[in-house]
Image (spheres, helix red, strand yellow):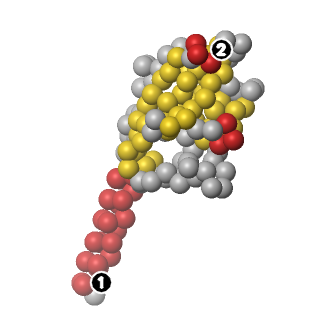
Amino acid sequence: MLRRLIMTLIAAAAVGGLVFAFSGPTQTDDSNLPPAVEAVFPLSGNLELRQTQIYADLAPGYTGYLAIDGREVPEDDVQFVDALNSLTLKPGPGSDFAVLEAGPHCATVFYRQIGEPRANSASYRWCFRLH
């Protein structure tokens, strides 16, 4: 009976430790975002699941494109929602971006005012880890 109680306590402590480890605080300080970039995800410095969406939300009047780990994401692999000015990585089958390996990654959003040439794009880069 004592042995069963001890095993139950150990199991409960292990589950509690896992919950604590994965529910820690996330970085929410977006003070370093340029005015044209309203939000990005995953947040800089965060540890996220490999299945997480990578996106950038631009201010009204801006458009842009994404790069992951220094490689531009083809237009076919990005969903741009005009009404929200958001760019989301949505890779198709066979895409180089279909599977991002576990480990550190950096994303860059290149942005410019609508109507401006692509050469006038500015950029914002953020890094995160996937597991």
Residue 81: image location, x then y, percent: 72, 31
What residue is shown at x 43% (from left), y 49% (from top)? 130
Residue beneath the point at 70% across and 27% down: 84
Question: In the rendered image of this protein, does residue 46 appear above or below residue 17?
Answer: above
Which residue in the protein does label 2 denote? Answer: 117
The image shows residue 129 at horizontal and vertical percentages of 40, 45
Q: Which quadrant, please, contains the C terminus?
A: bottom left
Task: Report the mark closest to the observer, 2 or 1.
Answer: 2
Q: Residues within 10 Å of mark 2 (few under 14, many from 20)?
A: few
Question: Furthest residue to the bottom?
Answer: 1
**Residue at the image position 38 percent from the left and 44 percent from the top:** 104
Q: In this orientation, which residue lies closer to the viewer: 69 or 50? A: 69
**Which amino acid does the dot numbered 1 rest on?**
Arg
SS at mark 2? loop
Q: Nearer the viewer, residue 4 or 15?
A: 15
Name the spot of residue 116 as percent of width and height, x first.
67, 12
Secondary element type, mark 1: helix
Q: Is residue 117 left or right of residue 97?
A: right
Report which residue position mark 1 lands on: 4
Q: Which label belongs to residue 34?
A: none
- Among the two numbered marks 2 and 1 on one chain, the one whose residue lies closer to the N terminus: 1
The residue that appears at 63% across and 48% down in the rendered structure is: 91
Marks counted in the figure total 2
